[in-house]
Amino acid sequence: MAQVIVPARKVLREQFGIHANPGQFIVALAGNPNVGKSTVFNALTGLRQHTGNWPGKTVDNAQGTFSYNNRSFLLVDLPGTYSIMAHTAEEQIARDFICFGRPDVTLVVVDATCLERNLNLALQIMEITSKVVVCVNLMDEARKKQIQVNISLLEKELGVPVVATAARQNEGLNHLLAALYRIATGECKTHHKQLQYSPEVEAAIAQLLPNIERHIDKRLNARWVALRLLDGDRAFIESIALHLQLSGNPVVREAVQ
Ligand SMILES: Nc1nc2c(ncn2[C@@H]2O[C@H](COP(=O)(O)OP(=O)(O)OP(=O)(O)O)[C@@H](O)[C@H]2O)c(=O)[nH]1
Ligand SMILES: [Mg+2]
């Protein structure tokens, strides 16, 4: 079947109202509610920002720009979510933006004082893309509570850059910029952690993968699409099919029946 690949920039423009300049890197800013995403956003973009709504939704949208090493970045503040399984409009925006908008980097801000809960979202995002930087924010609060975070071990375990910040105090932001640059330019390749499921689920994924890989745009993560097919997440399967113009594909037809 002939495949029509929709360029990510066109999707960003038409579906998300994001107009990036040529050569500008797109950074998606994701995280649980109230972890300091907007504080990071403001610290990086200063006054070079504007706010509005996501197209067709009553969900706030903020975009801003910054430069680093003579490269321009467009930072997009996604709605705060605990998950991207798309149970709410906010989760759907975050998921579709990361999946179909294919940002050059997804910056996941997590709360240093409750890492375990926050890493759930980071791991979900890492199932879609390897181009992730994790920002462990609120380090000052963690220090106050005598919580120690082993950043280098976390980085080793996750396989993506992890940067400690206290964004309200502008602490760690230079390291964050350097990490975003390294991932956006491809200077740093990640070996991101992929969750392993039960042998039954892994076997089902392995069975689906060849067919999925044959039919989808390589820039979507086939393993992740396999997981969604197994979930039976019909709304999303339909949106993947629509996006990749695969509605007639037998795998897709079977999944949405
Ligand atoms: N102590 C401390 N407070 C911070 C830090 N970063 C953000 N805050 C505070 O945490 C609160 C929430 O920050 P926001 O930036 O609004 O968080 P958010 O993730 O954008 O929140 P939502 O958009 O509501 O999901 C604010 O009161 C910030 O001033 C930090 O590093 N240390
Ligand atoms: Mg915010």
Image (cartoon, rainbow, N blue to C red):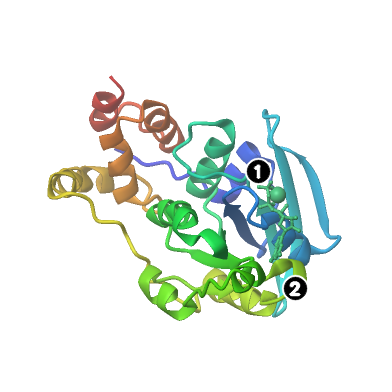
* Rendered residue at 56%/69% (across/down): 184
Image height check: is 95 above or below 136? above
- Residue 104 image position (x, y, % from top left): 55, 61
* Rendered residue at 65%/65% (across/down): 23
- Left-right relation of 58 to 218: right
- Farthest residue, direction top: 257
Identify residue type, mark 2: Asn
Q: Secondary structure at mark 2?
A: loop
Q: Secondary structure at mark 1?
A: helix
Mark 1 crowdedness (10 Å alpha carbons): few <14, some 14-19, many ≥20:
few
Identify residue type, mark 1: Arg
Query: Which quarter shows the N terminus?
Result: top left
Nearer to us in this view, 66 or 151? 151
Q: CA distance from mark 1 to mark 2?
A: 32 Å
Q: Quadrant of residue 180?
A: bottom right
Viewer-nearest of labels 1 and 2?
Answer: 2
Query: Which quarter shows the C terminus?
Result: top left
* Rendered residue at 16%/43% (across/down): 204
Q: Which mark is residue 13?
A: 1
- Residue 39 image position (x, y, % from top left): 74, 59
- Residue 176 image position (x, y, % from top left): 62, 74
Please tell me in which quarter of the rendered image ligand 1 is found.
Answer: bottom right
- Left-right relation of 133 to 165: left
Mark 2 crowdedness (10 Å alpha carbons): few <14, some 14-19, many ≥20:
few
